[in-house]
Image: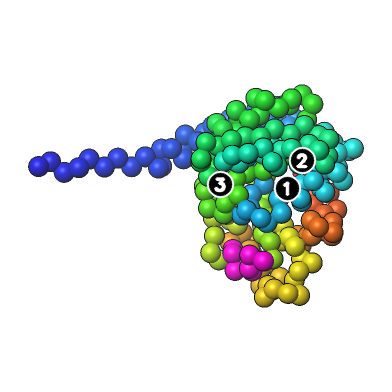
Amino acid sequence: MDPVKVIEIKKSVFADNDKDADELRRELKKRGVFLLNLMSSPGSGKTTTLIRTINLIKDKIRVAVMEADIDSDVDAVKIREATGIPSIQLHTGGMCHLDAEMTRQGLDNVDLGGADLVILENVGNLVCPAEFDTGAVRNAMILSVPEGDDKPLKYPLMFSICDLVLVNKIDVLPWFDFDLEKCKEYVRMRNPKARVLPVCAKTGEGLDAFAQWLLDEVREWKR
């Protein structure tokens, strides 16, 4: 009996996606649109963080949001009602990530002529979203205090690709065994260039710094 033929497709799939992502970034650069890919595990506070931050910057730049989920439009509705900005929902059909082509399909339904910043709230997952380049200009992620300070050790790829790490829910630090300095050290182990910002989406603490980071990045991208 002939041996079973095994075809390694992972590399070619990623290679094709990387090409698509690079092309998408070039198109966004020409149009002066900054795309942020925001990732985290479920329940880390992505949507609440976005609502508070968008309300800090929406009078300074034009913002739109793409919410990615396996199902439902809960987050897109929340964003639109709480901020008044354009928000669309992307259903992934059961997939736990977005790739460049899926991101492009979402952008085709956003008025890019009326947006300086488009925020992609990726599917809640610390593994799959990190494996696929979405075509974003910058990657950011949220790590919440209840998840533990060791997550950069357990999910190295996620932290290695992120330009910014928001440590959320710092209001509950006294009740959790979370060492902020150790967490920063672990992030630096994975990515020395990543910036770490402690924030609290519930109280708004630290979000001014996140808002300023976004404004600076958008302005730099538009130059």
Label 1 sits on residue: 47
Q: Examine the rendered structure and indicate whether residue 166 appears above or below residue 6.
A: below
17 to the left or right of 65 = left
Q: Going 56% across and 47% down the picture, which residue do you hit?
A: 129
Q: Is residue 36 visible?
A: no
Residue 53 screen position, x and y as percent: 81, 47
Cα separation, mark 3 vs mark 2, equals 21 Å
Q: Going 51% across and 40% down the picture, which residue do you hit?
A: 94
Cα separation, mark 1 vs mark 3, equals 17 Å
Q: Going 72% across and 61% down the picture, which residue do you hit?
A: 167
Magenta extent: 146-152
142 to the left or right of 51 = left
Q: Amino acid at mark 2?
A: Ile
Label 2 sits on residue: 79
Label 3 sits on residue: 129
Cα separation, mark 1 vs mark 2, equals 7 Å
Dot 1 alpha-carbon crowd within 10 angstroms: few under 14, some 14 to 19, many 20 or more: some
Q: Is residue 25 magenta?
A: no
Residue 157 screen position, x and y as percent: 54, 55
Residue 30 screen position, x and y as percent: 70, 27
Question: What secondary structure is found at the residue carrying circle 2?
Answer: helix
Q: Amino acid at mark 3?
A: Pro
Q: Going 71% across and 38% down the picture, which residue do you hit?
A: 76
**Disc 3 and disc 2 in contact, CB within 8 angstroms:** no
Q: Examine the rendered structure and indicate whether residue 104 appears above or below residue 166.
A: above
Q: Is residue 73 visible?
A: yes
